[in-house]
Amino acid sequence: MPTPLKIQHLRQFLMAADHGSFRVAAQGTFRSQAAVSAAMQDLEQQLGAPLFEPGKRAQLTALGQAVAPLFRELLATHDRVLDAARQYGMGSQGPVALAVMPSLADEWLPRLLERYARSHPDIRIRALDETSPEVHRLVLAGDVQVGVAGQSPRTAEVAFTPVARDAFGLVCKKSHPLARRRGPVTWAALADERLIGNATFETLKNRQLGSGIDDPAIVVSNRASLLASVVGGLGVTVLPVLARPAAGSGLAFVPLVEPVVERIVGVLTRKEETLLPSVAAMHALALRSLAQFTRRKGAVLV
């Protein structure tokens, strides 16, 4: 196997060739002139022929003239690759893919992306809006590096950091009789209401809550469309605290009890996998941002 060329030797060769001086090459690479001369001899031995005319000041032979553009191209490629690798190492380059459950996609996710893009302007980001089970699947498969989802039976297969204890409540128009009551309402009180299902209902199924939770007549997956349907009088819905509507929406959020139903929301990555610095930065920001959002929405930090 041939001995690999040394990048430092190629730099010294090109500097000597460009300036016609071994002294300039020595100064430019912080080596002694004797060290540069020895390096050129090593390079000539590797190639099997002289690169400089003997007895003349750094004048290239025909071989030297032929290989100079090749060495220049090799150095340019080396420097470009090294710079790109360093950018990855510093976290200023490297694609980031994350998946977020729908209840956080409308309000929290855009804020997260804006904050991340501000500090990492050159990073390409791919963000998906998926159900919690699908978020877990995507992380396990390596299709995304960071997920934000509810705890599930598959959580043991990933590195899951819990952030919020997210309780469910009724979302209805402020003029609705259940909204005018003082305090929380029971699940049983929803028995006579037209329930509009949404993606979070998967968390509520098979809990014997009654009130049409397991089989709602209408299902709207998009949160904005869901809230618009409630505003329009189509019915009422159930959402966790983190997805509660904004104060100026005309909608009320009423805690549901008997029983209190909660989910644990957190940030997940693959187990025992060292993240790219750009991904690690997204993971850390997601944890901080989700904790801040949890406090602002009135949910409980774990």
Image (tube, helix red, strand yellow):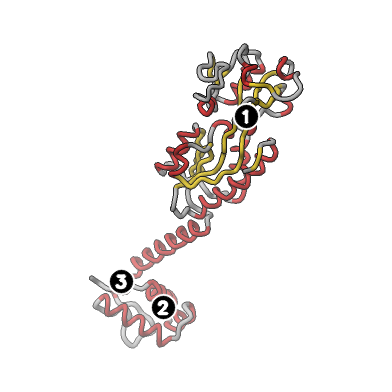
Q: Is residue 44 left or right of residue 34?
A: left
Say above or below: 236 vs 81.
Answer: above
Return the disc, 2 or 1, that comes first in the chain's sequence: 2
Q: Nearer the viewer, residue 262 or 173?
A: 262
**Residue contact between numbered discs 2 and 3, judged by CB atoms under 8 Å:** no
- Is the residue under label 3 in contact with that under label 1 (CB below 8 Å)? no
**What's the distance in space between the residues labelled 2 and 3, CA to CA?**
21 Å
Amino acid type shown at disc 3: Pro
Q: Is residue 87 above or below residue 231?
A: below
User: Which residue is denoted by mark 1 in the rendering?
Assistant: 260
Give the Cα separation between the discs numbered 2 and 1: 78 Å
The percent coordinates of residue 159 (x first, y second) are 48, 47
Nearest to N terminus: mark 1 or mark 3: 3
Q: Quadrant of the N terminus?
A: bottom left
Numbered tag placed on residue 128 in the rendering: none
| SS type, badge 2 | helix
The reply to whether callout 2 and callout 1 are in contact (CB within 8 Å) is: no
- Amino acid carrying mark 1 in the image: Val
Q: Which mark is residue 16?
A: 2
Instruction: Name which residue type carries label 2.
Output: Ala
Closer-to-camera residue (155/44): 155
Is 180 left, or right, of 265 in this rendering?
right
Residue drawn at (49%, 36%) of the image: 152
Numbered disc in front, either 1 or 3? 1
| Label 1 – label 3 distance at C-alpha | 68 Å
**Percent of width and height locating residue 127:** 51, 38
Read off the residue under disc 3: 4
Residue 96 visible in rendering: no
